Amino acid sequence: MKSRGAVALLLTILILSAILAISMVVAAITLTEMKMSESARQSTPGYFAAESGIEKALYYIRILGDRPSPTLESPYLIGSVLAGKGSYEVYIVETSPDLIMKSIGGYLDVRRALEITFYAAGW
C-alpha cells in the first residue's frame, strides 16, 4: 500500500512539474509577443516621422530652390522634433550626380529610416 501512495505522489509531482514547465514557456512566449507588438505599434509613427523629413527636404529643394551641399561639419540637411515624441533627421548621402537623402525618424524607443534618390534630371 505504501508503494502505491509513493508512486501516486511521484506521478502527481511529475505531472504538476510538466504543467508548470508548459505554463512558463507559454508565459515567456506571450511576453515576447507583447514586446514585439509594442515595438510594431511604435514603428508606424517612426516611419511617418522619417517620411515627414523626406517631404520637408523635397519641399526645400523643389519650392525654395535650395540645393543642399553637405560638409563634414554639418552632414544633415534638416532635423526637427514633431508634435508628441517623434523626431527626424535628414542626411545627404551623395550629391553627384544624383541627390541621395536618408531620413531617420524616431518615436519613443523605435527608429526607422528611409532613403530616396532624387535624380539629376529633377534638379
Image: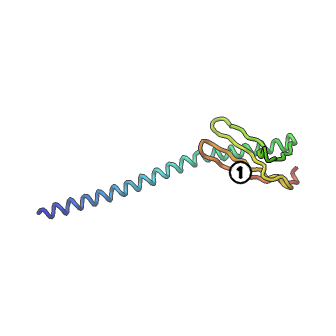
Q: Left or right: 52 with respect to 123?
A: left
Task: Return the residue at label 1.
Answer: 114
Q: Residue at x 71, y 51 (%)?
A: 114
**Quadrant hosting residue 52:** top right
Quarter of the rendering occupied by the N terminus = bottom left
**Which residue shows up at 57% across the image and 46% down it?**
41
Q: Position of residue 22 (x, y in %)?
A: 37, 57
Q: Front-most of 74 and 35?
A: 74
Relative to 103, say whether 4 is above or below: below
State the residue at coordinates (58%, 49%).
Answer: 40
Side of 98 where 39 appears, left or right: left
> What sort of colour scheme is used for the picture?
rainbow
Residue extending furthest toward the top: 83
Q: Is residue 23 above or below residue 53?
A: below
Query: In this figure, what is the number of numbered marks?
Result: 1
Residue situated in front as seen by the camera: 44 or 89: 89
Coordinates of residue 10 in the picture (x, y in percent): 22, 61
Residue found at the very far front of the displayed protein: 73
Picture quarter containing residue 58?
top right
Q: Position of residue 70 (x, y in %)?
A: 81, 47
Q: Residue at the spot x=88%, y=54% of the render?
A: 121
Q: Amino acid at mark 1?
A: Leu
Q: Position of residue 111 (x, y in %)?
A: 64, 47
Q: Residues within 10 Å of mark 1 (few under 14, many from 20)?
A: some
| Disc 1 element | strand
Q: Is residue 79 left or right of residue 60?
A: left
